[in-house]
Amino acid sequence: MEGGRWSPKSRSLYNNLDAVSRHTIQVYPMSWTAILLTLDNAGMWNLRSEAWDRQYLGQQLYLSVVSPARSLRDENNIPENARLCGIVKRLPMPAPYT
């Protein structure tokens, strides 16, 4: 956590040895916070703001941890009518899970 703008030089400040485990973090105005995630099982993970108005404005993202088995047990297929944005819009749809 640091005030000001993040830059690649900021990576030298990360604590990768004995970081504190947390369920929530704060990002203060005019500052940044780096997080390290352990995604320990396959499926879709949602990383979001606690405040609904911020989620509505796009302060959330989804991470997909793909199982080598590509099984419907771990994750559902992307719906045909899903709205895609950004660079994902130009990518081909992934192969369906079985």
Image (spheres, rainbow, N blue to C red):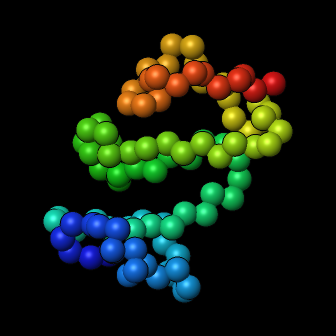
| Residue 7 vertical position relative to residue 48 in the rendered view, above or below | below
Q: Is residue 16 left or right of residue 95?
A: left
Q: Quadrant of residue 44?
A: top right
Quick one: which residue is furthest to the front in this view?
9
Q: Residue at x 42, y 31 (%)?
A: 87
**44 and 84: which one is in front?**
84
| Residue 24 vertical position relative to residue 15 in the rendered view, above or below | above
Q: Is residue 71 left or right of residue 20?
A: right
Which percent across, then down, holds residue 82? 49, 19
Q: Residue at x 45, y 23 (%)?
A: 89
Which percent across, then down, holds residue 46? 50, 46
Q: Residue at x 46, y 22 (%)?
A: 90
**49 and 11: which one is in front?**
11
Quick one: which residue is furthest to the bottom in this view?
18
Q: Residue at x 39, y 27 (%)?
A: 85
Residue 52 visible in the displayed image = no
Q: Is residue 3 left or right of residue 39?
A: left
Which percent across, then down, holds residue 67? 76, 43
